[in-house]
Amino acid sequence: MGFIVVLFLEFPADKVDDIKSKLLNAAAIYRKDPETVEWNVQQDLTDSKKITLVEKYERESSLTDIHRKNPIYQETIDLITSNVSKPIEKHFIHH
């Protein structure tokens, strides 16, 4: 059974382009992790301050056993949490 994580994020307008660029760089690294099916950064078409991360893994344990052990994981979390302008909306889905 696969596992999907969806994060809805909002950043200040003056920071969103830089943050998006860093997240796209991180995505390229995360996509190479074993058991990572997809790791996408998507920007809202009507409100450019809003970014959605869609992460797909082969199984739920892929998130904790592999993804969170990636050397850039904490850097990515710090980038997000120190810059969001609204609380992060998280969704976890089995498929």
Image (cartoon, rainbow, N blue to C red):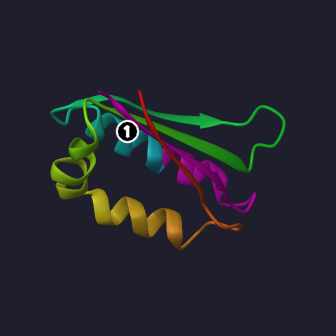
Span shown in magenta: 1-21
Where disc 1 sits, the SS reads helix
The quadrant of the image that shows the N terminus is top left
Residue 14: say if magenta: yes
Looking at the image, which is closer to me, 18 or 67? 67
The residue at the point 60 percent across, 42 percent down is 52
Residue 42 in which image quadrant:
top right
| Residue plotted at (75% across, 57% down) | 13
- Is 68 drawn above or below residue 52 in the view shown? below
Quarter of the rendering containing residue 85: bottom right
Report if residue 71 is visible in the image. Answer: no
Q: Amino acid at mark 1?
A: Ala
Residue 84 in percent (x, y) is at: 63, 66
Residue at the spot of label 1: 27
Q: Is residue 1 visible?
A: yes
Q: 92 or 45, which is in the foreground?
A: 92
